[in-house]
Image (tube, rainbow, N blue to C red):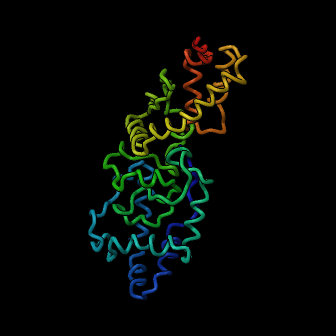
Amino acid sequence: MKQLSLPPHGAADVFFTCVNAVPDPLARANYIANHHHMVEAISAYSAASQEKTWCSLPRAAWGQADAIVVGSLSKSNLTDLYSSYMVPTSMAARATYDEIMVAANGKCPFCGGVGIVTTLDHYLPKSGFPLYSVLPANLVPCCKDCNTGKSSSFGVQPGQQPLHPYLDDPKFFNERWIYATVQNGNPIGLQYICAPPQTWQPVERERLLSHFIDYNLAYRYSVLAGAELAKVIDSRKGSLRNLSPEGFQAHLAEGAASQWFDVNGWNRTMYHALAHTPWFYNASFELPAPVPL
């Protein structure tokens, strides 16, 4: 998982940039007349961010695009701000969209860079929380797998909330809470697990598990680790064959400590597991002797 800086764009400014693109004068006037409701919604999001209780924010009814959400604005009025007046490349607000996208340097923060950023994800889904459709703090760069794999629903309890790349505690991004065990099979594999420190609050540990499950990290990490692990074993049989078991363990530990990888990323976690598995770093992985004819 990767922490990102909060977008610097003013929430009210982005709202008005979208509104000013609305071609119908009456529709545009309706948005402007409800400006104070949007200011209140922005303030409510900020307060929820302080307490990490985004799940407590008011939700719109499922479906019912014409249902009034706040003031005289319907659900479709609010979601249209994003789909019709922010996403299209011809719209002025598209500049904000693009600036938020590139801030991630192409690496999806939800999966720790497993996927490449291709879109913006609504942390609070716009289907349930249309008030935040164009709120910069609610728009997060995201890869296709994370965007399509994540449910359009959002947990109703604090422990069911996934990590917020902008607004969550830095410890979730800087301290280890994902581990792996090495499976001694043919082929050798890794099983990733979510195991936050026991000293962290129960709700924090629940949230990390929700994130781990919601973004299918165990499976996605293990797939990538399989190919890298094969390379490690080949190196042990080749260029690293003269290292002692202790030397090979030290080599693996270097990968586990590399600052080039996220501490909870699939690669650094893999090396951490290998360096802490005695049967693995003691193995020579020599090819079996040929069977006599």
Q: Is residue 16 above or below residue 100?
A: below
Q: Nearer the viewer, residue 243 or 141?
A: 243
Residue 136 placement (x, y as % from top left): 51, 62
Q: Nearer the viewer, residue 180 or 6?
A: 180
Residue located at (34% from left, 75% from top): 73
Q: Residue at x 41, y 84 (%)?
A: 29
Image coordinates of residue 45 in percent, x first then y, are 42, 58
Residue extending farthest top: 292
Where residue 149 appears, as percent x and y from the top left, is: 41, 51
Determine if residue 288 is in view. yes
Location of residue 7 with respect to 291 vertically, above or below: below
- Picture quarter with the C terminus: top right
Q: Position of residue 97 (x, y in %)?
A: 55, 66
Determine the residue positioned at 31% across, 69% down: 69
The answer to whether 280 appears left or right of 33 in the picture is right
Please name the residue shown 54% across and 49% down the image: 115
